[in-house]
Structure formats: C-alpha cells, structure tokens
Amino acid sequence: MARYVKVSVLGRKEPFSVDVNSGYTKAVDEMLKCLQKEIELVLPERPDLIVLPEACDRPVNLPTSQRKDYYLERGTRILDFYRQVAKDNNCNIAYSAIRNVPDGTFRNSTIMINREGKIDGIYNKNHVVHGEYTNGGIYCGTNAPIINCDFGKVGCAICFDLNFEPLRKKYEKQRPEMIIFSSNYHGGIMQNYWAYSCRCYFVAAFGYGESTIVSPVGETIARSTNYFSYFTKTINLDYAIAHLDYNWEKLKSMKRKYGPGVTIHDPGHLGSVLITSEIDGISAMDMVKEFEIELLDDYFKRSLEFHESIRAEDFA
C-alpha cells in the first residue's frame, strides 16, 4: 500500500556565526535564533520528516578549545527546541549534534524526534575522525540501531562513517527503509552505492554543499541547488526491487493489471527496477507475490548457489 513520506532536507549556504565573546549563554541564544529562521524555510511544506546537517548547532567561529564548554552550557536547550517544533508541527526531526553523556565523554549523534516531541532513538557516529577524539573527547559509537519511526524503519550514518564497510554491511543485513546521513562531507558515489547496496532511500543533509535524496536503485532523485540549500521531496516507502532477468513478462502483466496503481521505474544500465505501489489496499510485495516476480536479492542468492553447483577446477 502506498506509503508516502514528505521529506524536507536542510543544508546551508553559509555556516552560522555567533558572538562567542559575550559568554556561552548568549552564543546559544543566538544559535537558537539562527536555527528558528532555518527551520521556518521548510515548515510551510508540512513535512513528515525534517533532516538537519551534522553538528547543526555548532557555530563555525567557535574555537575548538571552547566547544566542550559551549556544549555543556547548551545542554538540552536546542534539543528541547526541536522537540517542541516537532510537536507543534506534527513532524519528525533528525537532529544531529554533539552531546555529552553521563560518563563525561561526548558523542557525535543523530537524535530521531517523533511527532509528539519524544525521542524514538539515537545513533552515535561509529567512525569519528582523529581530531574529534583528540580535540573534542568524542568517542566512537558501537551500534547501528534500526530506529522505528511512524513512517518506517530508519538507519543513520554521519559524515566519515560513509567510508567504512563494517557499518554499511550491518545495514545491508538489517534492511532499513531509509538511511539518514547528516554530514559536513558529501560522499560522492558512496551515497549512491550505500542506497543501492542497502536497498533503501538515502537522505543526505550536507552542511555546506549539495544535499540529496538517493533512491534504492542508486539514483539521485532530489537535490539542493546553488540558489536553495533546502528542498522537500515526497517518496514512497512501499517498494520492492527486482532484476529484469526472468521477470520481463511478469512485470508487463503486473502493469497491465494495475496500470497507474503500480510504478515500475528503470534507472537505466543497472538491470534492476524499483516497483512501488501507488494505491491503497495492495502493497508492492502483494503485487510481487501475485505475479511470482523474483526479487533482486533472491535472484542473486539463487545465482550464487547455481555458480557453486557448477564450479569446477580451473586449469591453466
């Protein structure tokens, strides 16, 4: 059954600067004003989800040596602000920030806030860069939780994470429907590869450059521009992915029956298509089962088993 999710992604044209010489309380006050103006850019769209960039409440002109004191003064003030925004506007917010934990150390985290202003889950960056630890006391997280939000199953990654296979492999096994990537690094082709290999939508809020949404077949379907650092895109989380091999006629039959009630999207060159249900009462998987369409992962698994069955010794 169609599961449409309206996603607003907030990047930035320019970093936020605040008065860091008049005390941390005033610096937090100024940052709150900046963040209020920023989020008001997308609230008129009435999104289901708003995604913010990495460390979104850190002033760019704050010296590294002062960051810990700033975070301690900030406490939960900005988190509480976003919780209220989420509640007042009936939306989810992915809030990325440095946070202190009870043992006195810090984590680089994405906090998933739900429509009631409560926290659905927290992801801690698994792969920090050296300077985050040596200069900021930020430790690596150890888990890759799937966070159950009202719109679907979410995984998270932050900036440097995108370079490391162990984290991606965890998500490949867990199969989230969306990976939220808050970052100050774009990631290039890795965005598309993560989306395709994890079979999910990839939503990237990039601090000072192009933010994007990538589909489960690795195709960039929305992006910010040089004029607008933010955008809103509706995606459909009721989807399935199938290879074209042995499915051509089945896909044609499915389209003949359901017409505009099903979308079969070919990104080109990949050999795989994205099937989405556009109607109520019947899911993409219902349609797949009805026409006995072999899913991409099942096809690859069957192929590997076949290869093993006919493998013979190579002779030079």
Image (cartoon, rainbow, N blue to C red):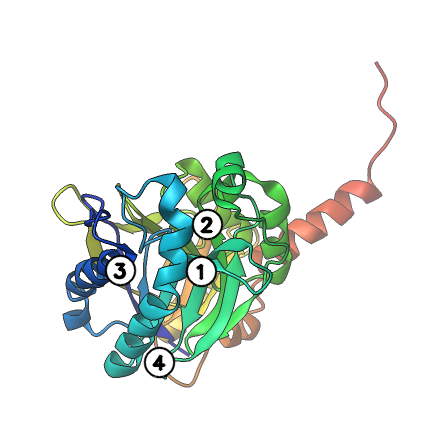
Nearer to the camera, 248 or 267: 267
Q: Do the residues labelled 1 and 2 touch (CB within 8 Å)?
A: yes
Residues at discs 4 and 1 in contact (Cβ within 8 Å):
no
In whole angstroms, how far apart are the C-alphas of marks 4 and 2?
Answer: 23 Å
Q: Is mark 1 on a helix, strand or loop?
A: strand
Secondary-structure class at tag 4: loop
Q: Relative to 295, is 93 on the left or the right?
A: left
Quick one: quadrant of the N terminus? bottom left
Dot 1 or dot 2: first in sequence order is 1
Are there few (<14), some (14-19), or many (20+) residues within 10 Å of tag 1? many
Q: Nearer the viewer, residue 179 or 16?
A: 16
| 3 or 4: tag closer to the N-terminus | 3
Name which residue type carries label 1.
Thr
Q: Give the number of the mark in front: 4 or 1.
A: 1
Quarter of the image for residue 226 reads: top left
The type of residue carrying mark 2 is Ile
Give the camera-side residue of 116 and 108. Answer: 108
Instruction: Tell me the element at label 2.
Output: strand
Real-space CA distance between mark 4 and mark 1, rounded to the nearest whole angstrom = 16 Å
Q: Sequence order check: which comes first, mark 4 or mark 2?
A: 4
Q: Is residue 85 visible?
A: yes
Locate residue 286, reporting x and y percent. 52, 77
- Asked if disc 1 and disc 3 are in contact, CB closer than 8 Å, the reply is no
> Of callouts 1 and 3, which one flags the residue occurring earlier in the amino acid sequence?
3
Q: Which residue is drawn at 36% across and 43% down?
A: 184
Q: Distance between the residues labelled 3 and 4?
A: 24 Å
State how far apart marks 1 and 2 are (Cα). Answer: 8 Å
Identify the residue position indicated by label 2 in the image.
Answer: 158
Q: Say which residue label 4 marks.
A: 115
Find residue 221 and report its horizontal and vertical position in percent: 30, 51
Q: What residue type is labelled 4?
A: Arg
